[in-house]
Image: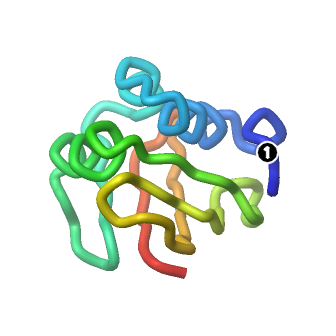
């Protein structure tokens, strides 16, 4: 596993840290205005998705690997709703903040 503080991309590092600490303010700060996301190839409402998949069910990412300068991750993701699954995450970073991320099973 890669410790969060050793992730290569600062915006992705901030995103993962916010997810793992359940910090909604830090999560919002890691995102660019108007950020978008998709889950398993379907675009979702980011705020609704984050509440259902991250914050309410105590989401947590253990990073297995990174590529693309730290903007692509493979993680063991777990939450109280779904348990643990191997997931892939791809991030688009603009001006130091995440403008889009895509996640799904790896």
Residue 83 in the image, given as x and y percentages of width and height: 42, 64
Seen from the viewer's position, the closer of residues 4 and 37 is 4
Q: Who's the residue at 79% across and 45% down the image?
A: 8
41 relative to 79, above or below: below
Kindly identify the residue that appears in the image at 71 percent across and 42 percent down: 9
Where 13 sits versus 92, above or below? above
Disc 1: which residue:
8
Is the residue 49 above or below the residue 102 in the image? above
Which type of secondary structure does the marked residue at label 1 adopt? loop
Q: Farthest residue toward the top?
A: 25
In the rendered view of the protein, which quadrant contains the C terminus?
A: bottom right
Q: Residues within 10 Å of mark 1 (few under 14, many from 20)?
A: some
**Residue 103 falls in which quadrant of the image?**
bottom left
Rendered image quadrant of residue 73 = bottom right
Q: Is residue 83 left or right of residue 63?
A: left
Q: Return the x and y of residue 39 as percentages of the image width and height.
A: 32, 68
Q: Which residue appears at 77% of the width and 44% of the height? A: 7
Q: Is residue 40 visible?
A: yes
Give x and y (percent) for residue 37. Answer: 32, 57
């Amino acid at each position: 596993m890669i410790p969060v503080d050793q992730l290569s991309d600062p915006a992705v590092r901030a995103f993962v840290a916010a997810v793992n600490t359940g910090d909604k303010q830090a999560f919002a700060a890691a995102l660019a205005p108007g950020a978008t996301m998709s889950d398993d190839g379907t675009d979702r409402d980011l705020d609704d998705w984050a509440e259902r998949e991250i914050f309410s069910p105590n989401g947590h990412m253990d990073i297995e690997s990174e590529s693309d300068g730290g903007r692509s991750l493979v993680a063991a993701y777990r939450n109280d709703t779904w348990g643990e699954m191997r997931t892939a995450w791809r991030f688009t970073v603009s001006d130091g903040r995440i403008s889009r991320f895509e996640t799904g099973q790896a």
